[in-house]
């Protein structure tokens, strides 16, 4: 059993004390929802005295963000994706050099396969966080997940999907929901900042979308019903926060629908905590979603949220209580829900107030950090 390093906190396991060093793997280059969760986790673990090593791509946003954190060493390496077979050797050498107590893999793009197996081959227990709800072949899923001592699902939907795909490994699957900084994302009186930023009329009803510009996020689905909504409510404007390969196609759709003056693309923003309270509501209608950190942030700001009843979104929202859930297979459901939320100020206020309370109780960053730490302890206790 390793001794606690001088100057750091040890972690107690049933009367034993164990120094903990964790190597974290994050392959994302941008500070999207998953990478932001890793930032929260690293800050929380470092505050507990745990020694962390973050392995991430060169010139990634997360490297710049956490480089100033105490208790976190940042190592930037080439990460080329699922076909970057040389990544396997890089990771094995890194694990051998740092001799961590645990390896925690936070993303896909090759690190989930190569990270788990190389940790296994070097005798280090590994944990994988699964953040997306997507189809996988059972055999390939089992091969990928088998080396892991624990698999963390960020929503109940992902947990059930994993149990179906990796039968026999059910006892390794844990549910730890994502969390956000509720003190940072909080309700605030409208400042008018968005109105000035986008030169909007003072009576504008501002609908926000915060998501990557990719197919499954559902931007096109919302745009399709906007002409009918705006016919009855001409003050509606849609602000799209995010970036991605679908931007050109979405702009063309907007032009074809005659919505060029009604929809604005705001790009990726790192100041959403100050911008979200200026929206009147958030709409998020993806085909599938692991959890949806942007939705959590909006709920925390007390915004009324309209979203599709898929994946982890149903973990966060109770229909008619903390938000509105839409069945995407039901004709006219999205347009009708949009009409309700635009027309009914009392409904918006009630949903936003209840949503804020739920986030504080169930989806704080601290709760997420404690949940991950509990899984770490469970895995390491098995080794003692």
Image (cartoon, helix red, strand yellow):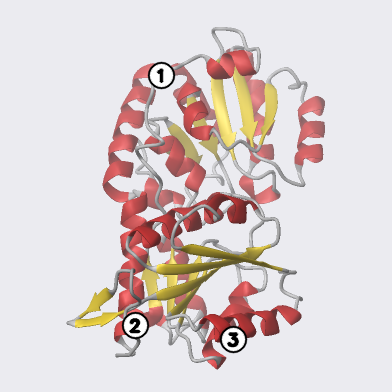
Q: Secondary structure at mark 2?
A: helix
Dot 1 or dot 2, earlier in sequence? 1
Closer to the camera, 371 or 299? 371
Do the CB atoms of the residues marked 3 and 1 lie less than 8 Å apart?
no
**Residue 320 in which image quadrant:** top left
Horizontal side of 255 relative to 97 (left or right) equals: right
Q: Residue furthest left?
A: 15
Is residue 285 something that shows in the picture?
yes
Residue annotated with mark 3:
118
Which residue is disc 1 drawn over?
A: 344
Decide: is 340 above or below 158.
above
Q: Residue at x 35, y 31 (%)?
A: 351
In this view, 2 is above or below 336: below
Residue 304 position in % (x across, y down): 42, 30
Q: Which residue is mark 2?
A: 380
N-term mark: 3 or 2 = 3
């Amino acid at each position: 059993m390793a001794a606690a390093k001088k100057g750091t906190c040890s972690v107690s396991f049933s009367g034993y004390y164990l120094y903990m060093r964790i190597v974290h793997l994050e392959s994302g280059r941008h500070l999207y929802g998953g990478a932001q969760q890793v930032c929260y986790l690293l800050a929380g673990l470092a505050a507990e005295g745990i020694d962390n090593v973050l392995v991430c791509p060169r010139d990634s946003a997360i490297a710049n963000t956490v480089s100033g954190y105490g208790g976190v060493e940042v190592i930037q390496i080439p990460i080329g994706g699922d076909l970057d077979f040389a990544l396997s050797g890089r990771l094995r050498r890194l694990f051998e050099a740092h001799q961590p107590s645990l390896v925690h893999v936070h993303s896909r793009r090759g690190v989930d396969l190569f990270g788990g197996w190389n940790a296994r081959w070097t005798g280090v227990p590994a944990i994988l966080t699964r953040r997306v709800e997507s189809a996988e072949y059972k055999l390939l899923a089992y091969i990928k997940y088998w080396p892991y001592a624990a698999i963390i699902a960020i929503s109940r939907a992902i947990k059930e999907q994993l149990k179906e795909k990796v039968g026999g490994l059910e006892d390794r699957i844990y549910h730890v929901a994502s969390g956000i900084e509720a003190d940072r994302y909080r309700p605030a009186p409208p400042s008018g900042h968005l109105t000035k930023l986008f030169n909007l009329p003072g009576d504008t009803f501002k609908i926000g979308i915060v998501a990557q510009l990719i197919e499954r996020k559902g931007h096109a689905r919302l745009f399709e019903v906007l002409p009918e909504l705006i016919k009855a409510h001409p003050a509606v404007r849609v602000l799209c926060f995010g970036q991605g390969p679908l931007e050109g196609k979405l702009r063309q759709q907007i032009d074809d629908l005659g919505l060029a003056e009604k929809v604005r693309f705001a790009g990726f923003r790192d100041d959403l905590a100050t911008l979200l309270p200026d929206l009147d509501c958030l709409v998020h209608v993806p085909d599938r979603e692991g959890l949806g950190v942007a939705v959590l942030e909006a709920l925390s700001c007390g915004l009324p949220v309209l979203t599709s009843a898929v994946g982890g979104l149903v973990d966060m929202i109770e229909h008619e209580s903390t938000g509105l859930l839409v069945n995407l297979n039901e004709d006219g459901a999205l347009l009708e829900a949009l009409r309700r939320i635009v027309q009914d100020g009392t409904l918006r206020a009630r949903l936003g107030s209840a949503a804020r309370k739920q986030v504080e109780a169930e989806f704080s960053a601290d709760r997420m950090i404690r949940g991950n730490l509990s899984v770490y302890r469970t895995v390491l206790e098995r080794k003692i």
